[in-house]
Amino acid sequence: MPRPAAGTHPRSPVPLGPTAGLGLKAQHYEQALACPAAGLWFEVHAENYMVEGGPRLSWLEAIRQERPLSLHGVGLSLAADEPPDLDHLARLKILADRVDPFVMSEHLAWSRRAGVYHPDLLPFPRTRSLLTQVADNIGRAQDALGRRLLIENPALYLALEGHEMDEPTFLNELVATTGCGLLLDINNVHVSVNNLGGSATAYLDALAPDAIGEIHLAGHAPDPEWGDALLIDTHAAPVSDAVWSLYARTIGRIGPQPTLIERDDAIPAFDVLMIERDRAHAVLTAVAEAAHA
């Protein structure tokens, strides 16, 4: 069914200037709250905070008083062949209304079918019929939330049969159809191209620049059996030099966009994560200053 054009669903004001953030972890709440770094913001997995109260939500609200916040969902299953779960959407809306994130995002993947949930972000064939279904699911989610969603490109490991278009084309079509935006995970691009073939720079150049509303940077690791022939998006390592290079090139092309350092396993000290965050902040600042020189 037809869905709203771009701009129909509002989003909270994006923080001004170069903005690089960190994924907020419970063990870092105190350091996050006290950190004086300019342009710092935080992102959380929404499902960890879709509760009515408790210490975790109280900490989140305290940090939201000091810093911009982004909500990153993992459970809407937007690429499923059925609509998003209404109860999940209702609980997500309560959280969003409570903390007013400047960005909300979800994955281009599915994880639920017929009431059964799978603990993974699963791929699908990029067909015209699936494009219509995914666009409808995104539209339903945006309507229920009253907010624009950014859709994240996945990390891919298996060459599925039946694709009718490449991934950048699929993403651009979703943007044009639903008014959503893109969360560009550059590590996922690097991992997918390494595993399945293609060109990372060609992929990135094919995305509509104006649609990109956030960037993720994360680490990967070689598969224990297949080595570098199969990279795994682990979120358990520093950002690689190859991904940093793609990031600098991308920011030079599209301009500064809010950038997140993701680390979800083997989590180091807050100060160690801030080193990578400050590196992203420096790239954003350099491009912004060059644009105004």
Image (spheres, rainbow, N blue to C red):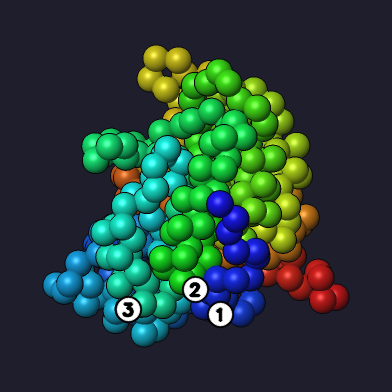
Q: Disc 1 vs disc 2: Cβ atoms closer than 8 Å?
A: yes
Look at the numbered disc 3 and give the secondary structure of its residue: helix
C-alpha separation, residue under disc 1 versus residue under disc 2: 6 Å
Label 2 crowd bin: few (<14), some (14–19), many (20+), radius 10 Å: some
Judging by the rendered image, the residue that carries numbered circle 3 is: 98
Residue 190: tell me if it is visible.
no
Q: Which residue is mark 1?
A: 13
Residue farthest toward the left in the current orientation of the protein: 54
Disc 1, SS: loop
Indicate left or right for 279 with 289 as reference.
left
Q: Earlier in the sequence, mark 1 or mark 2?
A: 1
Amino acid type, residue under disc 1 in the picture: Pro
Task: State the residue in front, 149 or 139.
Answer: 139
Q: What residue is drawn where x is 61% and y is 80%?
A: 16
Decide if residue 131 is on the left or right side of residue 72: right
Q: Secondary structure at mark 2?
A: loop
Give the x, y percent position of residue 267. 32, 50
The residue shown at (68%, 54%) is 176
Residue occupying the point 64% across, 53% down: 177
| The C terminus: image quadrant | bottom right
Residue 80, x across and y down, in percent: 41, 39
Number of the label disc, if any, that sits on residue 102: 2
Residue at the farthest front position? 1
